């Protein structure tokens, strides 16, 4: 049996990075994600795997170090929390515009502005809908446990390299700070220089006589070239939407009422479903695991048989817009959220559910 | 089996590490656990608390507002959490520095003077293990054998010679806990 270790979600990200052959981490401390770099500094992977761990002078700097490392075909990453991620958005746009792979972890706290250091899910719109200028998408995956933090880092790099696109692990203060048992997976060594040259023919790895130089840039001033590049990106996103949607369902088989919730909220909603089921109300839960691509088809498919659907988020209404698009009028869509670091209890959601559905 | 526990006190009393050792012990017993600390402004003000959930099933919400057991080690925590104990639940408190004692009649209340436990063993750092021992006497949800394994996992290896002392503090805590109100 693999060893099970009690660790924080943030620690799981760091340990997973070392064990999955990440080449470089560039970051800047911010609550509630500071344990990522703290753990890396404690583990000193530069002495074992050769992984670089560097505290940059700002988040702007760390994302641009990621940009540089990614251009060389390296597995590079950063992590931050909401205000820090706002500073990284320019860099994410450049990385997407240069079609480079990287993983960014956002351990969300409340905003806007400096907001609060308490947990929140209010970066949904920022990360899923934009995170920078231009017609691009991040691939966005949402962990709900410390084990997910460990596993999604590896999965994130797989997606990032498969599509040459930034991947954001959209976590939150609960998942980052909470300790749970984590099962360590087998170690993946860092790739050798030869392997990078073989697997990343686009990377700047030193120009041999046998090929033209590789240029990493997001700039093209020719209108037709730029338009065609954007169309190419859209074809890539269509493939991502076709192939990579991932979600989980809980008790949806005979459900008459559906909850949609991601990350920490999906765990709280499992408890909500249990309470409602114990009262004879047939409730179920769909947890989007990928937020981009969003499980529109799957939610739309379930909507036809539902009396109502409620989106439950630690913000004041962001993902609910996507739920409405998915449901497309097939049944009423409700919303309940909290802000400022207040976390809803299952009982509180049950009460809101009954109010919305006139069951009181 | 599901036990939802809040442990609260001053920073430095070993609240977070006590929760971690309890959680690790439960993992050794092949149970599911979550350990969710306070990390907000209240922590910066000197009080600390951690919510530990131990269950034989997958744990949904890691955050609860009603607890099966509250372990409170200062007046602020007693004031804050006495009323969050579920009816029929358990409150364990350390009377040192407490002027307003718990008043509820619908819960089981126990008192553990863990400063005495630590003083008896001559090491103030085992204070929290005295408290843990008291809890385990009242709620034997993990075996002492697994607690010892949990200790070994939680304590940095350079301090492994202290496991025996911690174990002793747990035993001492078990025999020191007093019943105050039993329903």
Image: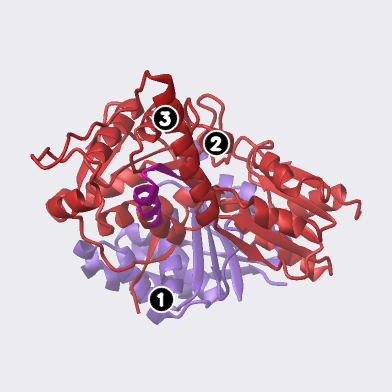
| CB within 8 Å, label 2 to label 3 | no
Instruction: Tell whether B92 sits left or right of B11.
Output: right
Chain A rendering hue: red
- Marks 3 and 1 sit apart, C-alpha to C-alpha, by 46 Å
Q: Which mark is residue A123?
A: 2
Task: Indicate the position of residue B104 as horizontal and vertical percent values.
Answer: 72, 59
Image mark 1: chain:
B
Does residue A299 show up?
yes
Image mark 2: chain:
A
| CB within 8 Å, label 3 to label 1 | no
Q: Residue at x 38, y 19 (%)?
A: A222
Image mark 3: chain:
A
Up-down relation of residue A272 to residue A239 (above or below): below
Q: Look at the image and give the residue range highlighted in magenta.
A: A155-168
- Marks 1 and 2 sit apart, C-alpha to C-alpha, by 37 Å
* Badges 1 and 2, same chain: no
Instruction: Tell whether B135 sits left or right of A207.
Output: right
Q: State the SS at label 1.
A: helix
Task: Indicate the position of residue B124 as horizontal and vertical percent values.
Answer: 33, 57
């Amino acid at each position: 049996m693999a060893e099970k270790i009690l660790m924080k979600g943030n620690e799981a990200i760091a340990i997973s990075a070392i064990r999955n052959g990440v080449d470089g981490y560039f970051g800047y401390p911010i609550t509630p994600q500071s344990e990522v770099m703290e753990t890396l500094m404690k583990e000193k992977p530069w002495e074992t795997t050769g992984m670089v761990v560097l505290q940059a002078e700002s988040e702007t700097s760390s994302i641009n170090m990621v940009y540089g490392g990614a251009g060389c075909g390296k597995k590079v990453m950063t992590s931050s929390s909401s205000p820090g991620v706002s500073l990284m958005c320019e860099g994410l746009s450049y990385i997407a515009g240069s079609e480079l792979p990287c993983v960014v972890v956002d351990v969300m706290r409340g905003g806007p502005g400096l907001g609060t250091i308490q947990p929140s899910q209010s970066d949904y719109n920022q990360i899923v809908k934009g995170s920078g200028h231009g017609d691009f998408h991040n691939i966005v995956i949402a962990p709900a446990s410390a084990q997910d933090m460990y596993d999604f880092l590896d999965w994130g790099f797989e997606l990032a390299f498969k599509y040459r696109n930034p991947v954001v692990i959209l976590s939150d203060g609960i998942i980052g700070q909470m300790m749970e048992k984590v099962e360590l997976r087998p170690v993946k060594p860092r790739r050798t220089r030869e392997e990078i040259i073989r697997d990343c023919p686009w990377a700047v790895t030193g120009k041999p006589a046998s090929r033209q130089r590789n240029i990493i840039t997001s700039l093209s001033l020719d209108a037709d070239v730029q338009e065609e590049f954007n169309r190419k990106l859209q074809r890539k996103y269509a493939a991502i939407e076709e192939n990579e949607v991932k979600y989980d369902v809980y008790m949806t088989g005979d459900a008459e009422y559906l909850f949609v919730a991601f990350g920490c909220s999906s765990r709280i909603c499992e408890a909500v479903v249990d309470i409602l089921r114990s009262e004879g109300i047939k409730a179920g839960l769909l947890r989007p695991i990928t937020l981009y691509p969003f499980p529109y088809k799957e939610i739309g498919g379930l909507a036809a048989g539902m009396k109502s659907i409620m989106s439950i988020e630690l913000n004041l209404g962001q993902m609910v817009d996507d739920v409405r698009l998915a449901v497309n009028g097939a049944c009423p869509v409700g919303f309940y959220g909290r802000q400022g670091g207040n976390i809803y209890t299952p009982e509180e959601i049950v009460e809101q559910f009954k109010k919305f559905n006139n069951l009181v | 089996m599901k036990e939802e526990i809040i442990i609260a006190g001053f920073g430095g009393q070993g609240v977070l590490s006590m929760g971690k050792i309890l959680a690790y012990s439960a993992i050794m017993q092949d149970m599911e656990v979550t350990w969710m600390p306070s990390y907000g402004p209240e922590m910066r003000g000197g009080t600390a608390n951690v919510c530990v959930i131990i269950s034989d099933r997958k744990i949904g919400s890691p955050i609860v507002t009603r607890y099966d057991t509250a372990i409170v080690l200062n007046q602020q925590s007693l004031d804050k959490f006495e009323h969050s104990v579920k009816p029929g639940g358990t409150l364990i408190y350390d009377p040192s520095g407490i002027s307003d004692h718990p008043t509820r009649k619908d819960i089981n209340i126990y008192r553990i003077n863990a400063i005495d436990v630590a003083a008896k063993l001559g090491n103030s750092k085992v204070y929290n293990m005295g408290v843990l021992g008291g809890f385990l006497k009242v709620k034997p949800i993990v075996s002492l054998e697994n607690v010892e394994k949990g200790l070994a996992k939680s304590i940095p290896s350079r301090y492994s010679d202290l496991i025996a002392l911690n174990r002793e503090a747990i035993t001492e805590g078990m025999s020191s806990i007093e019943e105050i109100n039993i329903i």
